[in-house]
Image (tube, rainbow, N blue to C red):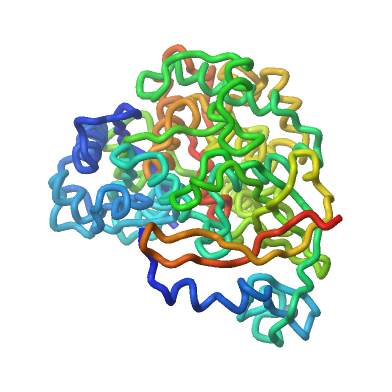
């Protein structure tokens, strides 16, 4: 289904540069951004936080049956990455051989094409991760 | 709060119904439930319908009004309830609360989904919407991929094996083969599960619940009033619901569903029963790993210990803790919005001693467990046969 441009555009700072949030009250970091700290709630002090883009594989799967718009990439690795600063996020692991990926493997952020919105639609970019040797 | 009982149940066969649309399915289940309860349309006070996405699946929103219209219940209030795969369970809980509160005396709760009009990639996208669109789907996640990530981590932390997950599928297909309304009527083997096509490793096709059309409807009544309609009263003695993070990666642990744990604690506390009192449980096995997680998070086993019971066949209909005698989502089928109501129907059939070959001996108390998405919604009910 074709998406409105703004729907993707409004997440660009987070997706291109991995900007999340830090709660200055409890020092908890979040990715994606949060407007409320789930721990401190109204007492939380949220500000932007730049993640380094380095982390390790916490869990992973090889997706063979892909959703609409991702079929041409299948099969691909999808992982929960534990960022060095703490939070977990979901990302594809690319340019990686089957024997390179395992729980604990070091990875770092890369900037990649995420999907194409049909033949005439826009190309969306975002982050994927690569093995960090 | 007033006491509430289930007085009527109705269900369609689950499967691929090329000839039937969304409304045909609900009409069939609704008619069966009203006949089973022996109530007249004018005695019914309200209707709740659980459906995840008829809008995206068949282009029909406003589903509750449609159902009220077509099962002849106008002008009573009709409300659609949505909580992804837990929509049916939430519809049931809302109906229960409406009667318990004293607002209404007789309420109908239904659930339905018409899924086979879409192709696999389309339905995969719609179901993916139960997760986080911006931070899971955009990254290329599917619903099986999210549960595969839970499975992989569970295997890492607790040494769960692919064979253990396969045993869940084999058991649920066995149960389904004894259930006329189930989608699958054939038994399968561990080898067949392990050799089936990989969907999202380590999950294979036979680890995944299928795409299904179907509907289920139940009728609830205030307990004293219920006695007018039936001798076998199935009382709702506990109801719990909880929410958790929408995205898997935002959870403290990805090998447990906290919403399930909280919903179960609430339902058990209200029912004043313990795990030992539960004679059977219908859990939300959208994937085989989900049944393992459910048995742990509901509190029947410690983390990592459910597989031991599974390996010892304790979860069969004749075992010490019968799980998913309907065949579960895996064997009976998973018409998303209908599943939560189907679980109530199956427990009622068991408590009424009408389950035939898959009957659990002396079943008196049953539990249902319905999950939305990867665990952002969970709803648990406990039902008891009273004389
Ligand atoms: Zn905080």
Number of marks in picture: 0
**x then y, percent, for residue B248:** 63, 56
Identified at 48% across, 38% down, the residue is: B383
The quadrant of the rendering that contains the N terminus of chain B is bottom left
A54 in relation to B224, above or below: below
Q: Quadrant of residue B169?
A: top right
Q: Is residue B342 left or right of residue B381?
A: left
Give coordinates of residue B197: x percent, y percent: 56, 27
Instruction: Pinpoint residue B66: horizontal percent, then vertical percent.
Output: 18, 52
Q: Is residue B63 visible?
A: yes
Q: Is residue A32 left or right of residue A58?
A: left
Farthest-out residue, right: A133
Residue B226 visible in the displayed image: no
Residue A55 rendering spot, x and y as whole percentages: 80, 62
Q: Quadrant of ligand 1?
A: bottom right
In the image: residue B287, left or right of residue B65? right
Q: Residue at x 37, y 41 (%)?
A: B338
Quadrant where the C terminus of chain B lies? Answer: top left
Q: Is residue B180 above or below residue B250?
A: above
Q: Nearer the viewer, residue B268 or B126?
A: B126
Name which residue lies at 50% across and 24% down.
Answer: B325
Towards the viewer: A53 or B262: A53
Query: What residue do we see at 21% from left, 49% from top?
Result: B67
């Amino acid at each position: 289904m074709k998406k409105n441009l703004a729907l993707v555009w409004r997440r660009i700072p987070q997706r291109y540069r991995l900007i999340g949030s830090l709660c200055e009250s409890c020092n908890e970091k979040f990715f994606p951004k949060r407007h409320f700290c789930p721990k401190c709630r109204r007492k939380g002090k949220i500000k932007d936080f730049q993640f380094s883009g380095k982390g390790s594989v916490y869990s992973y799967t090889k997706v063979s049956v892909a959703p609409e718009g991702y079929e041409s990439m299948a099969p691909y690795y999808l992982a929960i990455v534990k960022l060095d600063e703490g939070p977990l996020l979901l990302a594809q692991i690319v340019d990686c051989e089957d024997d390179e990926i395992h729980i604990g493997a070091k990875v770092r952020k890369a900037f990649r094409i995420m999907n194409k919105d049909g033949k005439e639609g826009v190309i969306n970019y975002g982050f994927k991760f690569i093995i960090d040797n | 709060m007033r006491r509430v009982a289930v007085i009527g149940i109705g269900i369609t066969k689950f499967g691929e119904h090329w000839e039937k649309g969304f409304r045909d399915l609900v009409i069939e289940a609704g008619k069966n439930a009203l006949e089973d309860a022996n109530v007249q349309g004018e005695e019914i006070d309200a209707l709740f319908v659980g459906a995840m996405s008829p809008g995206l699946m068949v282009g029909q929103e406003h589903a509750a009004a449609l159902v009220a219209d077509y099962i002849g219940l106008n002008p009573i209030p009709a409300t659609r309830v949505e909580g992804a795969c837990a929509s049916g369970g939430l519809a049931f809980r809302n109906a229960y609360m409406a009667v318990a509160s004293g607002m209404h005396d007789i309420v109908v709760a239904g659930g339905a989904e018409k899924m086979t009009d879409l192709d696999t990639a389309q339905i995969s996208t719609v179901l993916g919407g139960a997760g986080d669109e911006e931070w899971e789907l955009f990254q290329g996640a599917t619903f099986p991929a999210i549960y595969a990530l839970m499975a992989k981590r569970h295997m890492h932390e607790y040494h769960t094996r692919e064979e253990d997950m396969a045993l869940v599928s084999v058991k649920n297909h066995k149960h389904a083969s004894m259930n006329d309304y189930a989608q699958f009527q054939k038994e399968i083997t561990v080898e067949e599960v392990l050799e089936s096509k990989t969907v999202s490793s380590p999950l294979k096709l036979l680890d995944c619940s299928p795409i299904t059309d179907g509907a289920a409807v139940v009728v609830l009544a205030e307990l004293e009033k219920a006695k007018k309609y039936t001798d076998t009263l199935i009382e709702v003695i506990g109801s719990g619901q909880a929410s958790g993070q929408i995205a898997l990666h935002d959870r403290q642990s990805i090998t447990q569903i906290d919403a399930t744990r909280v919903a179960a604690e609430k339902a058990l506390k209200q029912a004043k029963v313990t795990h030992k009192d539960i004679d059977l449980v219908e859990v939300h096995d959208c994937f085989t790993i989900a049944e393992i997680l459910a048995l742990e998070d509901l509190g029947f086993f410690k983390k990592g210990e459910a597989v031991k019971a599974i390996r010892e066949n304790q979860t069969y209909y004749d075992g010490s803790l019968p799980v998913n005698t309907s065949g579960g989502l895996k064997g009976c089928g998973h018409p998303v919005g209908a599943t939560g109501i189907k679980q109530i129907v199956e427990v009622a059939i068991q408590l009424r001693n009408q389950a035939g070959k898959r009957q659990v001996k002396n079943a008196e108390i049953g539990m249902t467990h319905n999950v939305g998405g990867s665990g952002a919604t969970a709803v648990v009910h406990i039902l008891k046969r009273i004389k």
